[in-house]
């Protein structure tokens, strides 16, 4: 009987233990799921949702690092949705610290993206752009094409809004390299729309219209199409095609049932504005209606745009009273919002029709100067950040150690013993410096000799070979049966002319950057574009003439190689000065090449030889169908 009781108790204990193990195992996950759902219920109060998120964070620690970081990020979202932007920024920094501690690159990147969104909401565009660039770099390392494209779109919006259209174009072109991996091509429709606006600002209407149309071809959602049509219509208006703009806006208004009120009223306003430009009588009523509708929904930026459009419409009708009224309203709105660019635009219409034109003109001049400076600063900051910060730099913390008295005495003793060796070392250094000086002098002389040889060759090609061929061509053209020979001689003549140009003397004075830019532009065509950045930012006056000559020839070699072999449609050259180095990054989207040693032509080997003679180096990166890149580094 006793044994039976003991056995029964053992079985009961075992059942109890094993039945509680699953509940312990799943308790953390179940609790996490409960509080996670509770924190996301919008009907709950903000305070209760925060409290639920606290609990979710607690239980998530027992589940996994990624789940824990997700809950920390959601707390940032709660602050953001409640417009607690300072707390949201503090929370993103907490996430960043934790993600760094846990070595989660994806969550670090996501934290930078979130931080950029918050700074953008606070209208701190510089900080927003900085965080977006960090996020793009990390997502590039993670090869996350979708995130690269999404964040690049936000970064390019900032650049476009601040007038940095070159920077925006660069950001978009880089992002489009990842578009082939997207399953939904509509993701990149807005990139082409921004490119359309970039070319609009440059007055290149044909290219702008082409990109707007491409954006519309890729878009699939009705709301997206309507907004893209609106931007396309603005480009048509600025190009002078008023009727084309009217037709596009009528198409956009056909989507009215699927549009937000802001988007719908924006289309109505621009429709009325396009009609006013075309001289239609119903334009003013349409514009007034759009203004009233925007006022009803408290769309302040929309009201500003309506007043500007009405001011222009009434100015065209020579109604100074109405012009002054709407220009003044636009001025009041933009002044309250502290939007310098908007104030300047309002003053454009207000100054000609007001008695206070002198006072307002002074304000106009002052604001224009400050806006130009701000835009130039933004362009510089964006360019510097985009090209200098390609990967997040890790800064080392240097700890200073205290030196004890005994260590100090030992250090002094060591110094005394080394004085004798220092004298010998000084003599050795002097000898080495002298040898290096002689080598440098000899190297410079070889460079100058090579340059003089190139000049003589250029003169000989032009004065003797090219002229002789030209004389023969004249003789052959007089023969009835020799068109093929004439064509071949024409090709030889062009080749000798190109060789002459490529070996002509180079200006190394203050005109060097201008001549270099002009030479590089000769390699472009209607099918091949060149993006040239940072050339004017380099202090060329401190660079030796012989170094300038070698830089000129190396770039000439790269561009010639590109034109002959790569079939590239886009080439980018970026110059920057880092410490005491001149760095030049070359890239094209051509067919690329295998970089095996046996496959390198004489052109590439020549560039290596030239840079090596300057103490610099050149690195190549290419593969078949992946374009060609080169990184040049030259001491200055």
Image (cartoon, rainbow, N blue to C red):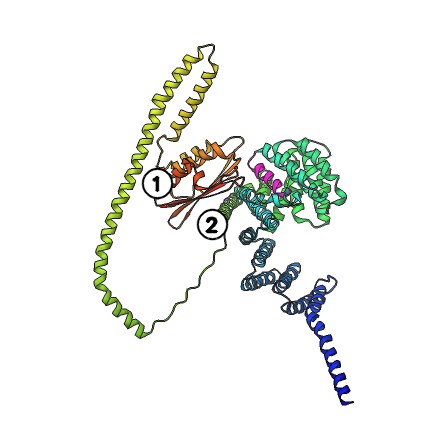
Residue 430 location in percent, x, y? Answer: 23, 53
Mark 1: few, some, or many residues within 10 Å (few <14, many ≥20)?
many
- Check residue 547 in the rendering and tell me which mark sits there, or answer none: 1
Q: Disc 2 and disc 1: Cα gap in Å?
A: 23 Å
Image check: 545 left or right of 346? left
- Residue 462: percent from left, percent from top: 36, 24
Question: With respect to residue 564, does 484 lie above or below?
Answer: above
Q: Tell me residue 288's x, y (percent).
A: 71, 41
Q: Tell me the residue at 74%/41% (across/down).
A: 255
Q: Is residue 347 magenta?
A: no
Q: Image point 43% across, 33% down: which residue?
A: 519
594 lies above or below 494: below
Mark 2 or 1, nearer chain start: 2
Q: Is residue 5 left or right of residue 389?
A: right
Q: Is residue 501 left or right of residue 98?
A: left
Q: Position of residue 306 (x, y in %)?
A: 67, 42
Residue 328, placed above or below residue 105 = above
**Magenta segment range?**
189-203
Q: Is label 2 in a helix, a strand or a loop? A: helix
Residue 245 seen anywhere in this rendered image of the structure = yes
Label total for image: 2
Pick the front one: 438 or 520: 438
Q: State the predominant SS element of the stretch in magenta.
A: helix
Q: Is residue 307 left or right of residue 522?
A: right
Element at badge 1? helix
Residue 388: numbered disc: 2
Q: From the viewer's side, name the closer residue of 326 and 533.
A: 533
């Amino acid at each position: 009987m006793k044994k039976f009781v003991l056995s029964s108790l053992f079985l009961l204990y075992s059942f109890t233990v094993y039945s509680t193990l699953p509940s312990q195992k799943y308790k953390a996950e179940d609790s996490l799921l409960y509080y996670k759902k509770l924190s996301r219920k919008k009907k709950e109060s903000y305070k209760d949702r925060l409290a639920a998120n606290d609990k979710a964070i607690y239980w998530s620690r027992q589940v996994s690092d990624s789940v824990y970081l997700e809950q920390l990020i959601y707390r940032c979202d709660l602050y953001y949705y409640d417009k607690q932007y300072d707390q949201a920024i503090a929370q993103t920094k907490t996430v960043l610290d934790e993600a760094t501690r846990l070595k989660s690159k994806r969550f670090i990147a996501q934290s930078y993206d979130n931080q950029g969104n918050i700074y953008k909401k606070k209208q701190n565009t510089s900080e927003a752009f900085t965080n977006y660039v960090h996020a793009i770099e990390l997502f590039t390392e993670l090869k996350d094409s979708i995130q690269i494209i999404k964040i690049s779109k936000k970064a390019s919006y900032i650049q476009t809004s601040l007038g940095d259209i070159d920077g925006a174009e660069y950001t978009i072109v880089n992002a489009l390299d990842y578009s082939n991996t997207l399953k939904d091509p509509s993701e990149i429709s807005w990139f082409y729309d921004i490119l359309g606006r970039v070319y609009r600002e440059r007055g290149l209407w044909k290219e702008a219209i082409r990109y707007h149309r491409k954006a519309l071809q890729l878009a699939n959602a009705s709301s997206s199409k309507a907004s893209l049509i609106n931007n396309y219509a603005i480009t048509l208006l600025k190009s002078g095609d008023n009727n084309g703009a009217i037709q596009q806006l009528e198409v956009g208004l056909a989507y009215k049932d699927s549009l937000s009120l802001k988007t719908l009223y924006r289309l109505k306003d621009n429709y009325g504005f396009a009609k006013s430009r075309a001289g239609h009588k119903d334009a003013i009523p349409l514009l007034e209606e759009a203004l009233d509708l925007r006022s009803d929904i408290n769309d302040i930026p929309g009201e500003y745009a309506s007043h500007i459009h009405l001011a222009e419409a009434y100015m065209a009708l020579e109604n100074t009273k109405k012009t002054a009224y709407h220009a003044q309203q636009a001025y009041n709105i933009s002044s309250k919002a502290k939007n310098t660019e908007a104030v300047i635009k309002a003053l454009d219409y207000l100054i000609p029709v007001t008695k206070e034109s002198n006072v307002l003109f002074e304000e106009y001049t002052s604001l224009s100067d400050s806006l130009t400076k701000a835009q130039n600063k933004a362009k510089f900051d964006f360019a510097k950040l985009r090209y200098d910060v390609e990967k997040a730099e890790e800064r080392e913390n240097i700890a200073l150690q205290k030196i004890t008295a005994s260590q100090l005495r030992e250090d002094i003793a060591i110094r005394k013993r080394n004085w004798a060796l220092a004298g010998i070392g000084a003599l050795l250094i002097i000898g080495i410096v002298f040898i290096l000086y002689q080598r440098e002098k000899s190297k410079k002389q070889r460079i100058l000799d090579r340059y003089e040889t190139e000049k003589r060759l250029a003169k000989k090609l032009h004065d003797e070979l090219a002229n002789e061929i030209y004389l023969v061509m004249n003789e052959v053209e007089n023969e009835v049966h020799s068109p093929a020979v004439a064509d071949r001689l024409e090709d030889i003549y062009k080749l000798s002319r190109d060789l002459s140009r490529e070996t002509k003397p180079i200006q190394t004075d203050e005109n060097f950057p201008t001549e270099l830019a002009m030479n590089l532009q000769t390699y472009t065509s209607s099918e091949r574009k060149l993006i040239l950045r940072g050339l004017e930012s380099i202090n060329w006056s401190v660079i030796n003439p012989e170094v300038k000559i070698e830089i000129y020839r190396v770039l000439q070699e790269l561009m010639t190689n590109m034109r002959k072999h790569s079939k590239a449609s886009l080439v980018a050259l970026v110059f920057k000065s880092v410490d005491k180095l001149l760095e030049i990054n070359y890239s094209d989207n051509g067919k690329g090449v295998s970089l095996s040693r046996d496959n390198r032509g004489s052109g590439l080997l020549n560039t290596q030889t030239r840079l090596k003679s300057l103490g610099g180096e050149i690195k190549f990166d290419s593969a078949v169908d992946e374009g060609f890149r080169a990184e040049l580094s030259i001491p200055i």
